Amino acid sequence: MSATQPPKAATLLAGTPTQFTQFAEGALDRARAAIAELEALGPGNDAKVLSLYDEVTRRLSDAGARSSLAKEVHPDGAFRAAAEQCEQRLEAYSVELSLHRPLYDALSRVSLDALDPAGVHWLQKTLREFRRAGVDRDDATRAKVKALNEELVKIGQAFGRNIRDDVREVKVAPDELRGLPADWLAAHPAGPDGLVTVTTNTPDYLPVMLYAQSVKAREALWRTYRNRAYPANVQVLKDLLSTRHALATLLGYPNWAEYVTETKMVKSAQAARDFIERGRLATEARAKADLATLVERKRRDVPGATAVEPWEHQFYEDRVKAESYGLDSQALRPYFEYATVKQGVMDITSRLFGIRYERRSDVAVWHADVETYDVLEGDTWLGRIHLDMHPRDGKYQHAAQFGLSVGVAGQQLPEAVLVCNFPRPGELMQHSDVETFFHEFGHLLHEVFAGRQRWAGISGIKTEWDFVEVPSMLLQEWPLDGAALTTFARHHQTKAPIPAALVEQLKQAKRFGVGLDTRRQFFLSAVSLAFHDRAPGFDTSEVLREVQERFLPFRREHAAGTHFELGFGHLDGYSAIYYTYQWSTVIAKDLLTRFRPHAMLDGSVARKYRQQVLEAGGSREAGALVQDFLGRPYAFEAFQQWIEGRD
């Protein structure tokens, strides 16, 4: 694919399962042929060795990304199943290559002298990953490693599939939904049995937890949500943890947490543990103050109350924001109609980064909901993005960015997909949904801007994993900026801009609850680490409750009968390193200090950030990229100030 033409990978998901399988098999065949050609080369062919290996990297990355996306979003179950099988075969071949000693030896012989710094960084990272995979072990060990990796792919797929396919529902009487917005109620009429069906999908779950006056309805939905994938994932999670532990110990590590953190910015499980504990301590005072305020508010409804239950947390937080800070979150919703928000995200990022989006209606995609845009700078194509933004059966239930084509300078442009579960055009969003939209769009832009490196192995989002959330955590600051909000937040009926007073109320109210909300993120970080820093065989629900006691104020007995960890999808992709989100937040808050002296819509700082951080992809260590932009190493202080309300 010429780098002067837009990519067209999405069309692969618009065909049949057979055609998709043929594409994946073709990618494998071409990769095998390139490896055979590479191994036949004699000394003095360093450039050709690297070129062939990078071609293999690109083909396998692209085919794997398309398979991963298709299994999560395709409306046809047979297509999803075929994509899952393709992903397994691609992963199996990637594992085989990672253990292929002749390939490692050929790459080891390449001289670094002719490479630029980015090329040296890429090759050294590549050789390190070969060694971490076990390429230098004996034949028997390599065979065991291969088998365990192949098993992990299957187990991980099952874990995610069981969550994705388990959309649960509760039926409640209409009067139990008093407090919900009128537009939400209109979209949820009672059925023939006189009851309203509420699902565990986000557009249902979040409004009910925020607004339903019925404690019974909220508790029922809360418990139902926390039993997704139960009991299907009970054994699957046990297998996932035990197989990871077996692989890590086979490779000489004490546990999976030590193995997976070694190549991250954090460097070790102990450093991750220390970071989580620092976060727990940093949030302790603010979380206690938040909780005291919630309990005090609850006493107005329940005299003598001494605790807030988990299904009451969001409800009373919203009440406090409305009554103490003047913010009625339902009053915000009319200003956040989905299509207007989408246009606002695109307009603001265009202005910040000097780009434009061109809608394409001539591209074959996998579902009628999907919108396609080319990303351009002037008349130059930078890449292509697709937006798959609304819930449907069989689709990934949360929000994430997926790749389709890794960008490589002079060869092909990046192509990526945003997958969310937002209300449809004409429907209204919560402000938290708006933040999520900006957050996920940050990933999308990172993929596009970073997709211009010489080598596929460092192009796109190829930074250390605990840095990947930084661009998204940073971009979600913009829907809290008054000037940014007024560019798109208009009443869906009157078209009046959001009042400045309402924006100020939003900003002030957002400060409340930061302690408890951030502490919950550190709780999830501690859970993911605790599941992976010990030998398997423990009761995951019991460990979760033990961690909850250290981090959250909710009574452990109320978690009885629920199995949140079985629906905690990040345990598959992120495994032990969910701390990534807060680690990235620390860095993002520090990066924000460079934007705040200017107007947030001033593109001068944003374009410097684009050039020095985003466009670099994985060509350097992430810490070095941040230091270039800040002029110093990143620090914890800005995060601490935010937690304490001093930002």
Image: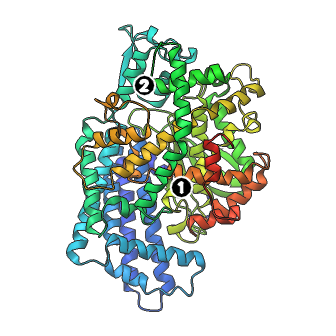
Q: Position of residue 560 (x, y in %)?
A: 29, 30
Colour scheme employed for the rendering of this structure: rainbow
State the residue at coordinates (43%, 28%): 310
- Which image quarter: residue 426? top right
Q: Secondary structure at mark 1?
A: loop
Residue closer to the observer: 381 or 216: 216
The C terminus, quarter of image: top right
Furthest-left residue in this view: 140
Circle 1 Cα neighbour tier, 10 Å, few/some/many (<14 / 14–19 / ≥20): some
Inspect the image, locate mark 2, and give the three-letter code of the amino acid beneath it.
Glu
State the residue at coordinates (27%, 63%): 247
Confirm whether residue 26 shows in the render: no
Q: Secondary structure at mark 2?
A: loop
Q: Position of residue 263 (x, y in %)?
A: 45, 66
State the residue at coordinates (39%, 11%): 195
Residue closer to the observer: 332 or 55: 332
- Label 2 sits on residue: 309
Marks 1 and 2: which is nearer the front? 2
What mark, if any, has residue 468 been given in the picture? 1
In whole angstroms, how far apart are the C-alphas of marks 1 and 2? 33 Å
